[in-house]
Image: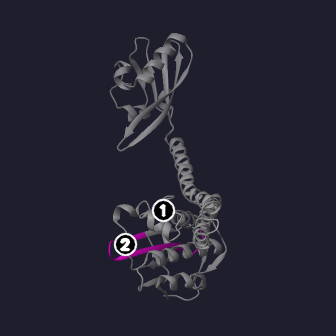
């Protein structure tokens, strides 16, 4: 009977020795357990004490059980109950819920940290302006400029948080309208001309195909390309060129079908390999100080990743220290059923 149950199940007889296991339990704790004392298999005081309490009181209990799978902890909720003279343990994997809880805690901590710094600065300057610098026009002008910068930073953060929330809400809904990419990319570059001029970066658009349309959400794709081009401007080298390329449609293994690649290549400092896998994490920054200086919130690539996922595409990041960074977006050309 227990062999048909998908959860790991362990049965302990009245002599405290293991009477039965099922295949999921053997994958969890190992084989050859039948006939052994349950302490040798479980080895965690919390669950061993709970078994003794259930046997003595007859009242079922729930307890936490932790195992280590390679480099990651796996968390189980174990339900312990009596069945005649036997004690039956069933294990339910709670790792996904633990991960969600940790993500939520990390998210709240990161948002709190990002908002605390500008708020502290604003409060400090307000106190100064109402006190020592009340009658100092030069100090007042300087402090008001800094306050405006910090307020704009908080506004960008709130806008990115709202954008991320909207993208996550729609991520499972595949967009169906047709979006023309050449004009979209040209408009994104045009809108960022002031930033490019201020950073002394030349943005060039190369198109290998004219008037290519893909199924998508025009607003979200504009946000993706605007974000990637803006990052290229911010972190590309002054006096260098940023090349945006719309490649011709081709068969892409990562898409398992026809797709188009849009790439943004800068000539900046590049990114060390150990950072690349984490770049799309919320609030992850390679250089926190520089990112804040140029107005980064740490959410841009997380938003890009979710939008690309919604379009059933792929986001690829390649970089080499001293040789710049290439960010590519692969999008399906044909709508999926």
Magenta segment includes 252? no
* Residue in front for this viewpoint, 270 or 186: 270
Q: How many marks?
A: 2
Q: Quadrant of the C terminus?
A: bottom right
Cα separation between marks 1 and 2: 16 Å
Dot 1 crowding, Cα within 10 Å, few <14, some 14–19, many 20+ = many
The chosen color scheme is: one colour
Q: Which residue is mark 1?
A: 280
Rendered position, 308 above or below 193: above
Q: Residues within 10 Å of mark 2 (few under 14, many from 20)?
A: some
> In the rendering, at what x and y percent does residue 42 appear?
39, 25
Q: Is residue 333 magenta?
A: yes
Main SS type for the magenta part?
A: strand
Q: Which element carries disc 2, helix, strand or loop?
A: loop
**Residue 317 horizontal/vertical position (percent):** 42, 69
User: Label 2, on which residue?
Assistant: 270
294, 204: nearer the viewer:
294
Residue depicted at x 55% and y 85%? 193
Name which quarter of the figure residue 290 lies in.
bottom left
* Residue 28 versus residue 199 in the image, above or below: above
Residue 201: x and y in percent read: 46, 84
* SS for callout 1: loop
User: In percent of the image, x 49 and y 21: which residue is there?
Assistant: 88
1 or 2: tag closer to the N-terminus? 2
- Asked whether the beta carbons under mark 1 and mark 2 sit within 8 Å of each other, the answer is no
Q: Is residue 255 visible?
A: no
Work out whether 144 lies above or below 35: below
| Region of the chain picked out in magenta, as a range | 317-336
Q: Considering depth in this image, is 282 or 118 the residue closer to the camera?
A: 118
Q: Is residue 154 left or right of residue 42?
A: right
Location of residue 142 with respect to 192 vertically, above or below: above
């Amino acid at each position: 009977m227990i062999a048909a149950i998908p959860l790991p199940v362990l049965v302990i007889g009245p002599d405290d020795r293991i009477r039965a296991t099922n295949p999921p339990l053997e994958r969890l704790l190992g084989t050859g357990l039948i006939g052994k004392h349950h302490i040798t298999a479980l080895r965690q005081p919390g669950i061993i004490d709970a078994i003794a309490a259930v046997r003595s009181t007859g009242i079922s209990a729930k307890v936490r059980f932790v195992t280590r799978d390679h480099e990651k902890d796996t968390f189980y909720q174990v339900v312990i109950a009596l069945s005649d003279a036997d004690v039956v343990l069933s294990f339910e994997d709670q790792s996904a819920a633990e991960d969600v809880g940790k993500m939520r805690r990390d998210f709240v901590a990161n948002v709190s940290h990002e908002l605390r710094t500008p708020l502290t600065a604003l409060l400090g300057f307000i106190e100064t302006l109402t006190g020592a610098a009340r009658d100092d026009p030069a100090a007042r002008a300087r402090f008001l400029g800094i306050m405006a910068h910090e307020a704009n930073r908080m506004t960008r953060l709130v806008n990115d948080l709202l954008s991320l929330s909207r993208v996550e809400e729609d991520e499972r809904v595949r967009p169906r309208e047709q979006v023309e990419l050449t004009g979209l990319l040209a408009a994104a570059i045009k809108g960022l001309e002031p930033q490019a001029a201020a950073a002394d970066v030349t943005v060039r658009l190369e198109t290998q195909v004219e008037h290519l349309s893909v199924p998508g959400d025009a607003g979200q794709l504009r946000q993706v390309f605007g974000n990637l081009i803006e990052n290229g401007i911010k972190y590309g080298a002054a006096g260098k060129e940023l090349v945006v390329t719309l490649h011709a449609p081709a068969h892409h293994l990562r898409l398992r079908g026809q797709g188009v690649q849009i790439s943004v290549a800068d000539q900046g400092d590049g990114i060390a390999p150990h950072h690349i896998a984490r770049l799309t994490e919320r609030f992850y920054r390679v250089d926190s100080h520089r990112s804040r200086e140029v107005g980064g919130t740490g959410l841009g690539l997380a938003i890009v990743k979710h939008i690309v996922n919604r379009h059933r595409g792929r986001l690829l990041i390649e970089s080499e220290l001293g040789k710049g960074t290439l960010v590519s977006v692969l999008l399906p050309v044909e709508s999926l059923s």
